[in-house]
Image: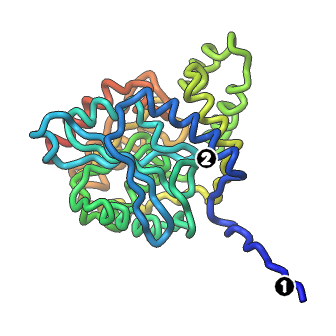
Amino acid sequence: MTVSQTVPRPQADVGRYVSDAWRDRYFAACDGVYALGATALTETDVETSFGTTHVYRYGPADPAAQSRTPVLLVHGAGSCSAMWYPNTPALSADRPVYAVDTPGDPGRSIQREPIHQPERAAQWLDETLAGLGLDRVHLVGASYGGWLALNQAHRRPERLASVTLLDPGGLEKVGLRFFVWIFASLFATFAPKALRPRLAAWLEQPVLIMPELRTMIRLGVRAYRIRRPAPLPLSEDELSAIHTPLYLVLGKRSLLVHPQRQVERVPRLIPGARAEIVSHTGHGPGIDHADEINRRMLSFMDSTD
């Protein structure tokens, strides 16, 4: 008698690669972007209730700086920790830095359970910090990673020395204009090379003029299937309950949030919060103005330390 075996279907709300071959092509592209930043001292896999989290550790050469409160970086949706290449050299010269690949996004983490629900997301990040042996960190999040950081400050703040949000989600509902910009930017990656500088300026997308970034983003879209809804914004009551020192940086031409509205609203709701708008940028202040943002972030961390 022949016994048939049924291959289990992947969960509908868990991200996955379409094939091993496409995964490996994406990893090679990521390595090209990582090479633009600081060299990681170590890579670590942390097991959590939701899967395996891959973490890159960067460190200062100065022994005195090695004992400073570390930084943990959480990237935006549809990307991986390679996006922090403009920030890792300056940050890791000042203090230890950890950059995580968020499960559910393309990267070297492996997702087994969904984490997009707020309490699950906070539990995942807390378990990751515990697995790294980190009791106190400066948490930095960009875009979707900003929502994760904001959510952590609300639900699991015990390990947080501070939170820095770079044009984050979680402050207001994601509008149509942001998704139009995302799709327009993606289509622009296929434009002729001669047109890309003009499109990059118009869309405020450095990915179009950096071959390594362009390749990584295009392969990520092709290789990985993200399965999660857009995160819901925190309510005013939830924001008001945050007591962790918080630094909000918004691009003046951000399409994810209304910058002027949020730069006035957030300090009103979160006592002591610092909020600033950066000119001449949209959704990517940490990439477009890396030197200035690195300086501001380190100054804020020093003040909380």
**Residue 293 horizontal/vertical position (percent):** 32, 30
Residue under label 2, please give it. Answer: 175
Give the total number of marks visible in the rendering. 2
- Are there few (<14), some (14-19), or many (20+) residues within 10 Å of tag 2? few
Q: Residue at x 14, y 39 (%)?
A: 65
Q: Residue at x 21, y 40 (%)?
A: 95
Q: Secondary structure at mark 2?
A: loop
Q: Secondary structure at mark 1?
A: loop
Q: Is residue 255 above or below residue 172?
A: above
Given the image, on which type of amino acid does mark 2 rest?
Gly
**Residue 168 horizontal/vertical position (percent):** 44, 46
Residue under label 1, please give it. Answer: 3
**Residue 84 horizontal/vertical position (percent):** 41, 36
Residue 141 lies left or right of residue 30; in this view the side is left
Given the image, on which type of amino acid does mark 1 rest?
Val
**Foreground: disc 1 or disc 2:** 1
